[in-house]
Image (cartoon, rainbow, N blue to C red):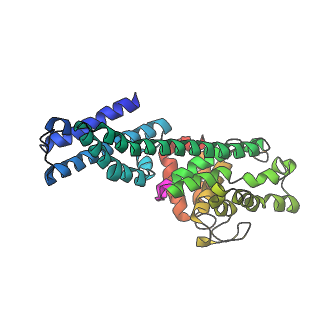
Amino acid sequence: MFNVSQAVVCSAAAVAVLQILGVEPIAISWPNLVVTPHIAASWALSALAFEATNLLAVTVGISLAYDMPVGQVVRVQRLPIVLFNILVLAPLGVLLALVALKGRWLTGLVLAVPFMLERRVLHAYVRLYESFTETLRLLVSALESKDTYTKGHSERVAKLARAVSVQIGLNSEQVELAERAALLHDLGKITVSSSVLKSSARLGPVELAEIRQHPAIGARLVSQIEFLRDAAPVIAAHHEKMDGSGYPEGLAGDKIPLLARILACVDAYDAMTSTRPYREALSPQVALEEIQRSAGTHLDPRVVEAFCQVIQSFGDEGTDG
């Protein structure tokens, strides 16, 4: 229903532009068609209207389906795909229509090949992305099967990391990288003994040293997988602090990757609002106040500001996963 309705509405918008500009559709003006600069410009604006309406429909659809603010969806749209549709596929569509109306069906079939190839490439991309996503979920499930107290933690952190990255204004590639790193940020805990992970007592120096190795271990694990390698520096630094008191390297300030600073903030918030073996969960309000107090010492003030805006827009949903 969505796809058919979208095609009808987008086509209507494209035709409306032609009518406003006093240009008839190709099928009506054929065979006495003369392509003047005015007609060519009108077609270009018509294609732009089609793509803009299509982008609006998809944006609203994603916003409703995933309960995301429209502004956040817009900021992570892939501009290269939109430009490809306008600059390459739209002119090919006009040329294909002209050839078909002239009755040169064999030429039309040849011109249709790029459209079929584009669809095949898009389908392959979607399949590859789905396999990629399933691999991430499998890795997270492996960790959660060992540490049941953190079940759902990685998913919630990934959701918040994505939202904060969008709020700060990062591009779509960085937003996706933040989400991937957040999903896998605790992967190194899979090598930590269960007794340490589930301990309800205060950890001693030996146990503390063991658990503080998980960022470096997680980074080493993902660095061995080519399509996850770019997440390794983010995972390695997600427990570093702005004042240099974090671990494992004691990095400070801008030496900590921005995505790691984002991850540190959202990870801390979700940890505080989750029940752990050694303490009960804090309320979202108390946790948020603690996050704000840590700005400038443990956390990046810019990230904290963006995080507060995200929590305000999500409400309590931001803690629900």
For this rendering, which residue is in front, 8 or 203? 8
The answer, for residue 283, to whether it is visible in the render is: no
Residue 252 painted magenta: no
* Residue at 30 percent of width and 32 percent of height: 8
Q: Quadrant of the C terminus?
A: top right
* Residue at 41 percent of width and 55 percent of height: 80
Residue 103 to residue 133: above or below: above
Measuring from the top left, give residue 159's x and y in whole percent. Answer: 57, 47
Is residue 8 toward the left or the right of residue 124 in the image?
left
Q: Quadrant of residue 23?
A: top left
Measuring from the top left, give residue 83's x and y in whole percent. Answer: 36, 53
Q: Quadrant of the N terminus?
A: top left
Is residue 299 toward the left or the right of residue 165 in the image?
right
* Residue at 33 percent of width and 34 percent of height: 7
For this rendering, which residue is in front, 39 or 68? 39
- Magenta span of residues: 166-172
